[in-house]
Image (tube, rainbow, N blue to C red):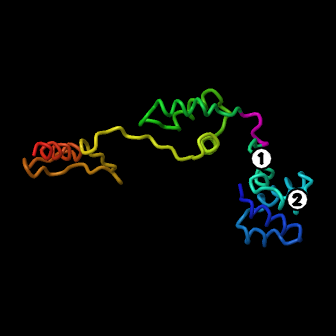
Amino acid sequence: MHDYNTILGVIELRLSKVSYDTVQKRYRIGRSGIILIMKRYNESGLSLDDLRQMPALKVVDLIYPKENLRHKDIPLPDFGKIHEQMVQMGKHADLSFLWIDYKKEHPNGYQLAQFYKLYRDFMVDTYGTSKTSMPVERIPGEKMFIDWVDDQPELLLDTATGELQKSYASFRNHLMTTKEL
């Protein structure tokens, strides 16, 4: 999907008989994208000036309708229900598991990437943002949460006892002794 400026630029250049190669290089768009934009523009029956008078979102929706013409026979997931399930799952929320459930019910349904995109669109339309967060309820200073950037270190040397421990166990013991101080 391309933005408003790209759509109008492609239409303007192609109406001026500029070659596909030039349009492709200028807007970094594939030939099939150019053909699709021009096809939908011609089907609309509107002039370029008409498009310029329209709000940007209406132009984008005209060229890329929300109801994708190729997917009319695919049932749209119930994202309201899916969002409720995500909230119920709490910190273990995983949209891919809900997609698997959807695919069991609808084997010819949307693939994972499209499912994610449709869910993001639902979030923006419903809540005004695609960003979701799950608050961690905690008492400040009581616990420390570590987000391992790479693989968790296997072993650490406990300097107090001289024994090798799993890193999370060593860190937990350190916190316990620190808390006792």
Quadrant showing the N terminus:
bottom right
- Can you see residue 112? no
**Left-right relation of 82 to 12:** left
The amino acid type of the residue labelled 1 equals: Pro
Q: Nearer the viewer, residue 111 or 83?
A: 83
Q: Which residue is mark 1?
A: 65
Asked if 98 appears above or below 172 in the picture, the reply is above
For marks 2 and 1 on the same chain, the one whose residue lies earlier in the sequence:
2
User: Where residue 19 sits in the image (x, y, percent)?
Assistant: 84, 71
Q: Residue at x 66, y 38 (%)?
A: 110
Q: Are circles 2 and 1 on residues that touch, CB within 8 Å?
A: no
| Residue 14 placement (x, y as % from top left) | 86, 67
Crowd around label 2: few <14 · some 14–19 · many ≥20 (10 Å): few
Q: Is residue 71 above or below residue 60?
A: above
Left or right, residue 65 beside residue 149: right
Q: Which residue of the protein is positioned furthest toward the top in this rendering?
A: 105
Q: Secondary structure at mark 2?
A: helix
Instruction: State which mark lies toward you, 2 or 1.
Output: 2
Q: Which residue occupies 12% across, 49% down?
A: 158
In space, the residues marked 2 and 1 are separated at their CA atoms by: 18 Å
- The residue under the point 46% across, 36% down is 93
User: x and y percent of residue 115 in the render?
Assistant: 62, 40
Residue 155 locus on image (x, y percent):
21, 49
Which numbered circle lies on residue 50? 2
Q: Which mark is residue 9?
A: none
Q: Is residue 166 above or below residue 86?
A: below
> Outermost residue, right direction?
45
Question: Is 71 inside the magenta-drawn segment?
Answer: yes
The quadrant holding residue 140 is: top left
SS assignment at label 1? loop
Q: Is residue 64 left or right of residue 127?
A: right
Q: Which residues are magenta?
A: 69-74
